[in-house]
Image: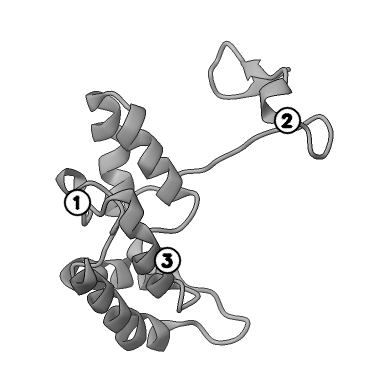
Amino acid sequence: MSDLVARTRAFIREVAIPAEPGWGETLTDAALQGLRAQAKDARVHAPHAPREYGGQGLALPEWSAVFQEAGYSLIGPAALNCMAPDEGNMRLLELVATDDQKERYLRPLVAGGIRSSFAMTEPHPGWAPTRTPSRPAPSGSTAGG
C-alpha cells in the first residue's frame, strides 16, 4: 500500500495541482477526463474499487492514507475517481449488486464513464431516515411518502 500512497502523492503534486482551475473557473469535463486518463496510466485511478472492475483493489482499512493524499488537491478526488457520492456508491454496488448490475453500473462508474447520485428526503430537519415514510413510486423513478 505504501507504494500506492507514494504514487498518489506524486500524482497529486505533479499532475493534479498544476491542473487546478484558476479562481472562479471550473474544471471542464475534457480536463477531468484527461486527468483520469493520466491517473489510470499512473495506476492511481479508483484506488478503492475492485481490481476486476478497473480499480486498484484497496481494502477498506487502507483507503484513508490514499484518500488523504488525493484530498491535498481540490480536484484530486475527482481526478482519481474517488469522490463522493461515486466512491460510496461503488462500494455499495461492490457489496450488494448482482453480477449483471455490477457490469451495467459498477464497471462504467469505476471507469469514470458515468456518475452516480444519492438522494434522501426528510419531512423535517434531522428526521431519522428509518422513520421516513417514503416508498418507491410504481415507475421506480420517483419517491413519495
Q: Nearer the viewer, mark 3 or mark 2?
A: 2
The outermost residue toward the right is: 124
Q: Nearer the viewer, mark 1 or mark 2?
A: 2
Locate the N terminus and report the quarter of the image it occupies.
Answer: bottom left
- Location of residue 83 with respect to 86 vertically, above or below: below
Disc on the earlier residue, 3 or 2: 3
The secondary structure type at the circle numbered 3 is helix
The amino acid type found where label 3 is placed reads: Pro
The amino acid type found where label 2 is placed reads: Ala
The outermost residue toward the front is: 61
Contact between labelled residues 3 and 1, with CB atoms less than 8 Å apart: no
Disc on the earlier residue, 1 or 2: 1
Contact between labelled residues 2 and 3, with CB atoms less than 8 Å apart: no
Label 1, residues with CA under 10 Å away: few <14, some 14-19, many ≥20: some
- The residue that mark 3 highlights is 77
Q: Residue at x 82, y 39 (%)?
A: 125
State the image coordinates of residue 106 (x, y, percent, origin top left): 30, 39
Q: Residue at x 18, y 67 (%)?
A: 43
- Location of residue 122 with respect to 46 vertically, above or below: above
State the image coordinates of residue 120 (x, y, percent, origin top left): 65, 35
Give the spatial CA distance, label 1 vs label 2.
Answer: 36 Å
Give the spatial CA distance, label 1 vs label 3.
Answer: 16 Å
- The residue that mark 2 highlights is 128
As rendered, which of 2 and 35 lies closer to the eye?
A: 2
- Location of residue 92 with respect to 130 vertically, above or below: below
The secondary structure type at the circle numbered 1 is loop
Label 2, residues with CA under 10 Å away: few <14, some 14-19, many ≥20: few
The secondary structure type at the circle numbered 2 is loop
Give the spatial CA distance, label 3 vs label 2.
Answer: 29 Å
The amino acid type found where label 1 is placed reads: Gly
Quarter of the rendering containing residue 36: bottom left
